[in-house]
Image: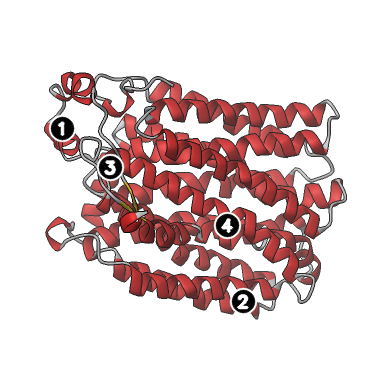
Amino acid sequence: MSQECLSVEKPESFERIIQPAANSLKPGLAATLAASPATKATPIQWRHVVILGGLGAFGPLAIDMYLPSLPDVSRDLGASMSITQLTLSATILGLSLGQVVAGPLSDALGRKRPLLVGVGLFILLSLLCIVAPSMSVLIPLRFFQGVVGAAGIALALAIASDIYTGVSLARTYALLLMITGVAPIIAPVIGGQILNFISWRGIFGGIAIIAAIFFLASLFGLEESLPREKRQPLGFGPTFAAFRTLLGDRRFVGYALSVGLAFACPIVYVSVSPFVLQNLYGLSPQLFSLLFSLSALGLISSAQLSNWLAGKVTPRKLLTVGIVLNVAGGVGMFLAVISGLGLVGVLVSFLLITASMGLIVPNATTLALSNTTTAGSASALLGVIQFTTGAVAGPLVGLAGTGTAIPMTATIAGFGVATALSFVFLTRTESTDVLAQESPAPF
């Protein structure tokens, strides 16, 4: 492929469909759409896709590679299941809160410096986790590992939104999600295999090595994407002002909740399923990691579908399909457990949930960021909503015990239904929602 890029062709009927609505827009959004690659092809650089996708995978890397070892950690450090789950929840919470710092900092200082500092500290904290002597030390280390690792997640989205807009941005998000989706497939398998040779502590060495590779890739392969003239003032005032503006936008909140509540479904599964599937259904760490990885193939397939349909089908329509799949997977998992269908029903339902994320994440993110001048802060706020919900829900489900899978599946089904309700009531089709207008190519 020449220039290592993808091109996005302009639909012939674009002006006829979009222009009447664009004329009624407020100036900021109209200007955004006027410059959008929906009207002009924008090359997608594969160098950006690979590096940014890898940085965005820091969350799955830190979480999923560690999953098969949870029962071993619990026994080795003499902690209960619920306490051991806090090592996951602390990481997820750190990933959430860290984006609040990384996003606004990058709006003021540029993207590259905060990114490199965050990844460098992530490597250091991964190495410190290797020698953690107790749960009281490991849990804080995992929290701060998440805080600094959040720079990769938040700034990957921000850098992409600096470089691309419109349909090209939607396709870029879908491609990034495909790269990120490889992490849940590879990471648990790597973690499970490491446990065949050394203890759970070796997993953190592997995480540090992978992070070091992307540190070097970012240092030499990424340019600064935010010009000085577009940077925002540094300080709590501008940051809180940006967050207040975003939270006052019902449209942004609706799409952010669509991502966050849907994302809580796999997070709850990730937090609780190692105990449920290994203790209740008798799976080995290796078989658990293999089945988890196969389920994650659904995410890659649906993200590829979202990428292929971008420009043919509107983001809102793709998001709608994703939410329907999410609800079907969550409710199906609950029904599989209470009906006695068992492991097969749980795994098939989780496949539907992971497939839904490939449609929900890139399209809800595109719609949420389609009208903002503070991409770093907006990406950070998306991350906070996305990770915090699951971080809180996981341990609470664990407190209910794992003698049955009902608490886990009921919670997942509840988040799926909440996702649908947020989408329906907060993002109803509006005349100003240009990205939600009918597509030239019907679905």
The quarter in which the N terminus is drawn is bottom left
Between the residue at mark 3 and the residue at mark 1, the CA separation in whole angstroms equals 22 Å
Q: Which residue is mark 3?
A: 244
Q: Is residue 88 above or below residue 145?
A: above
Please state if 6 lies on the left or on the right of 318 as rendered. left
Q: Earlier in the sequence, mark 1 or mark 2?
A: 1
Q: Which residue is mark 4?
A: 183
Between the residue at mark 1 and the residue at mark 2, the CA separation in whole angstroms equals 49 Å
Between the residue at mark 4 and the residue at mark 1, the CA separation in whole angstroms equals 37 Å
**Quadrant of the image occupied by residue 416:** top right
Q: Earlier in the sequence, mark 2 or mark 4?
A: 4
Residue drawn at point x = 66 percent, y = 71 percent: 203
Between the residue at mark 2 and the residue at mark 3, the CA separation in whole angstroms equals 40 Å
Percent from the top left, x then y, of residue 206?
Answer: 61, 73
Between the residue at mark 2 and the residue at mark 4, the CA separation in whole angstroms equals 16 Å
Q: Secondary structure at mark 1?
A: helix
**Mark 4 and 1 residues: CB-CB less than 8 Å, in contact?**
no
Q: Is residue 93 visible?
A: yes
Q: Earlier in the sequence, mark 3 or mark 4?
A: 4
Q: Which residue is mark 2?
A: 205
Which one is closest to the eye, mark 2 or mark 4?
4
- Mark 1 residue type: Ala
Which one is closest to the eye, mark 2 or mark 3?
2
> Toward the viewer: 379 or 400?
379
Percent from the top left, x then y, of residue 212?
Answer: 49, 75
Q: Which residue is mark 1?
A: 30
Between the residue at mark 3 and the residue at mark 4, the CA separation in whole angstroms equals 33 Å
Q: Is residue 101 visible?
A: no
Crowd band around label 3 with a 10 angstrom C-alpha radius: few (<14), some (14–19), many (20+): few
Percent from the top left, x then y, of residue 116?
Answer: 37, 72
**Mark 2 and 4 residues: CB-CB less than 8 Å, in contact?**
no
